[in-house]
Amino acid sequence: MSSIPSSALPARRGLLYVALAATAWGTAGAAAALLFQRSGLGPLALTFWRSVGGAAVLLALRPFTGARPAATRPAPGRILFNGLGLTLFQAAYFLAVRHTGLAVATVVTLGSAPVLVAFGGRLLMGERLGRAGLAAVAGAVLGLGVLVLGSGSGGVGGVEPAGLAWALASAAGYASITVATRHRAASTGAADDPAATTLWSFGVCAVCLFPFALAEGALPSTGALPSTLLLLGYLATVPTALAYALYFAGAAVVRAATASVVALIEPLSATVFAAAVLDEPLTPAALLGTAVLLLSVTALARSELRTPAA
């Protein structure tokens, strides 16, 4: 987490930050899948502990990240909006992983997110897609359809309607915070302190999920407690505290649709990890749908990068 204010970041560094965040996120679903197998925690309890752990890590690192001017602190309304969006993004994603497997949950969430972000950016900020961008969005929708309809019960972890619905809800949460972060920076010429934004967002997320975590069972089982604590520590640190601080910093200085497309590094790494480590099978239809989706959103990225930022 750099001490350089987000508004001073070059766009290329912002893209690098988003890419690093997405790479780290690609391991979060795998860690969650392993925790589901051995910890006894459910999706909502796991998201609660992820938020609490991420906030604790950021608080511990706060003295070393440099003081920020008071003007860069996020406003209460921004804190609440980001926190609610983050809650939906994280909790719905883990629910999707539980219902339909890591690979499908990740590809559907991050594959549909650029479509939502592109339209949100167009409506709120006038970010134009152009013909190439619209064709890429249509291709992404086609790829999602091939992936979901072609996988069936023997596909990547088995596509279940509930898992698909949760993945789309997660994408909506992701799109909302992506567009809002970019809109704030574009409209005011300033960006919120990414570390403070992340810290307060995790606080809102933890408060929202606390009663649900209690109802689901907030404490892990003692059978594999050492490995559970190690996995929870990793989940709170790398794909949470570090990744979200990098993401909020990067998303403030690059186009909203571009940020969402760069984040498609996550489904690539998660899909490979799911097949290699978690033994989730990959059918030809699933591979074809994934390829069409990722080619389409790569084309969307090129279209966005050729267009000067507003």
Image (spheres, rainbow, N blue to C red):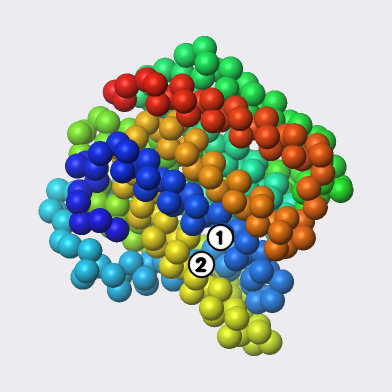
Left or right, 295 with respect to 15, comes to right
In which quadrant of the rendered view does residue 169 lie? top right
* Residue 123 shows in this picture: no
Q: Which residue is mark 2?
A: 235
Q: Give the residue at mark 1.
A: 28
Vertical arrangement, residue 223 with respect to residue 141, above or below: below
Q: Residues within 10 Å of mark 2 (few under 14, many from 20)?
A: many
Sequence-earlier tag: 1 or 2: 1
Residue at position x 75%, y 34% in the image:
288
Residue type at mark 1: give it: Ala
The picture places residue 309, in percent across and down from the top left corner, at 31, 25
Image position, residue 6 (x, y; %): 24, 46
> What amino acid is found at the position of numbered circle 2 in the picture?
Leu
Quadrant of the frame with the N terminus: bottom left
Please state which of residues 18 and 213 is positioned toward the viewer in this rendering: 18
Q: Secondary structure at mark 1?
A: helix
Q: Nearer the viewer, residue 244 or 93?
A: 244
Question: On the picture, is 111 further left or further right than 278?
Answer: left
Callout 1–callout 2 Cβ contact below 8 Å: yes
What residue do we see at 20% from left, 48% from top?
Answer: 5
Residues packed near mark 1 inside 10 Å, few (<14), some (14 to 19) or many (20 plus): many
